[in-house]
Amino acid sequence: MRELRHPNTTQKTMGVAYIECDTCAHCVDFHTPTADQPQALTTAQNAVADEVAKWLTEAQTKRANSDEEAGEPNWEDIEYE
C-alpha cells in the first residue's frame, strides 16, 4: 500500500491501493475476498485488513497503558450482581 500526503488536512498520511481489473467497481474492495477475483483486488483487501488490524492493536495497547497509568480498574475483574 502506498502512502500519500494530503496538504489540506491534519491527516499526515493516507494509505492508497490502486486496483486495476475489468470486473472491479466502486467499493468492490469492501467485500469478502473470493477465489475467483483478480489478484490485485485480493492484495488490496489484505493490505487494508492488515492496516485496520494494526490500528486496532495500537488502540488496544494505548488504552491498556492509559488505564494502567490512571489506576483504572480492570473492568473484566469486577463482579456484578
Image: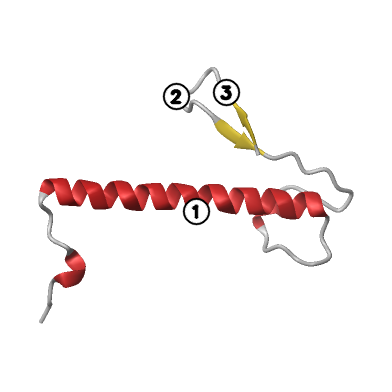
Real-space Cα distance between discs 1 and 3? 22 Å
Up the image or down, 1 lies above or below 78; here it is above
**Which residue in the structure is indicated by mark 3?**
5
The residue lying toward the viewer, choosing from 30 and 15, is: 15
Residue indicated by mark 2: 10
CA gap between label 1 and label 2 equals 22 Å
Q: Quadrant of the N terminus?
A: top right
Horizontally, residue 79 falls left or right of residue 21, namely: left
Three-letter code, disc 1:
Ala
Sequence-wise first label, 1 or 3: 3
Q: Earlier in the sequence, mark 3 or mark 2?
A: 3
Q: Would you say 9 lies left or right of 79 here?
A: right
Identify the residue shown where x is 30% and y is 46%.
Answer: 62
Q: Residue at x 83, y 43 (%)?
A: 20
Look at the image and tell me in which quarter the C terminus lies.
bottom left
Residue at 56 percent across and 33 percent down: it is: 14
